[in-house]
DNA sequence: CCGGATCCGCCCGGATACTG
DNA sequence: CAGTATCCGGGCGGATCCGG
């Protein structure tokens, strides 16, 4: 999979896709994209909303998303200055599969947590 | 989003989901899951297939996936020993949204790359 | 209010060597 | 073949201070 043909060309497409997924896979990116799904937001508004993200990481994440054309950054030169972030069309299109993934996570989280506990129990049992 | 209600409880569900997504977001996990989508595979078979993954990382990735109940690990004690990895039902269910994400990446990769180049050009232009 | 710049701890992840 | 153990360098990410 991750390829159109079943012959499975090893690296060609796959690596490129990985590169793109690297952005999505990033912890903060998904959360930020999720927050911007409803409406555009300002920097500190996002900062408070995501909660747990440091200023540095939020900045870097936003830069990355902007670089990939997933969000726009509009500066309003006023005092105090104002910067709004908003999903682009591309960003909104990404929202669709991301939401599906989120739904999967939400739906199967209990199952995963049970599996984790079972696994951890077996491990400690083996060690002891 | 990432929440059932629009009231957006900040941390409760969201953090848990992030925790689950952490596994999916992992670079190797997605690729391994993708490989196992078709059929079960042995360790070194996977190692060659994924291509780029180190032995250590493949081991860690497989442990994580097994811990989360996404794959099974069946040992056949023979000489040489044989270990097969296979997707569980849960793992296969995850394959669905992951494939959608992969499709998105495949479909929009050119757009993203163009955006990146444009962005980088603007940056260097500003710096110079 | 929105960042950039810097310092630095820490963990990820590769390389290597060794077991069953 | 399928790992575990160990070492270690690079980069991620937090904290802090400063600038517009």
Image: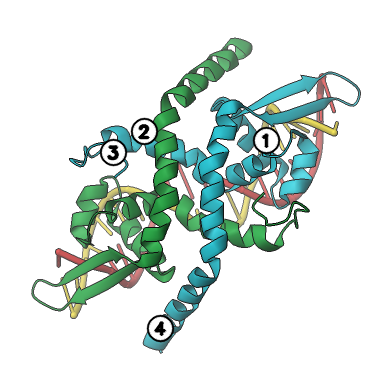
Chain colours: A cyan, B green, C yellow, D red
Confirm whether circles 4 and 2 share one chain: yes
Q: What is the chain identity of the residue bearing mark 3?
A: A
Mark identifier at residue A59: 1
Pinpoint the chain carrying mark 4: A
Q: Residue at x 51, y 65 (%)?
A: A108
Q: Is residue A83 visible?
A: yes
Q: Nearer the viewer, mark 1 or mark 3?
A: 3
Which quadrant, please, contains the N terminus of chain A? top left
Chain that bears disc 1? A
Q: Name the residue under label 4.
A: A122
Q: Nearer the viewer, residue C10 or A71?
A: A71
Whichever of labels 4 and 2 marks the residue nearer the N terminus, that label is 2
Q: What is the secondary structure assignment of the residue under circle 1?
A: helix
Counting from the top left corner in percent of width and height, residue A116 is at 47, 73
Label disc, if present, on residue A16 of the rendered structure: 2
The image quadrant of residue B122 is top right
The mark nearer the N terminus, 2 or 1, is 2
Gap between marks 1 and 3 measured at Cα? 33 Å
x and y, in percent, of residue B79 in the image: 8, 74
Write down the chain letter for disc 2.
Answer: A
Task: Please check whether the numbered discs 4 and 3 fall on a single chain.
Answer: yes
Q: Which element type, helix, strand or loop, lies under badge 3? A: loop
Which numbered disc flags the more N-terminal residue, 2 or 3? 3
Q: What element carries label 2?
A: helix
Q: Distance between the residues labelled 4 and 2?
A: 38 Å
Which comes before the other along the chain, label 4 or label 1?
A: 1
């Amino acid at each position: 999979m991750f390829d159109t043909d079943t012959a499975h060309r090893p690296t060609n497409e796959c690596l490129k896709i990985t590169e793109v997924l690297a952005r999505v896979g990033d912890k903060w990116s998904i959360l930020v994209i999720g927050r911007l799904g409803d409406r555009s937001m300002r920097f500190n508004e996002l900062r408070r909303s995501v909660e747990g993200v440091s200023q540095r990481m939020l900045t870097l994440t936003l830069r990355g998303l902007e670089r990939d054309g997933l969000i726009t950054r509009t500066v309003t030169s006023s005092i105090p200055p104002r910067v709004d972030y908003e999903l682009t069309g591309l960003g909104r299109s990404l929202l669709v599969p991301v939401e599906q993934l989120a739904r999967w996570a939400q739906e199967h989280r209990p199952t995963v947590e049970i599996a984790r506990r079972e696994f951890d129990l077996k491990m400690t049992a083996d060690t002891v």
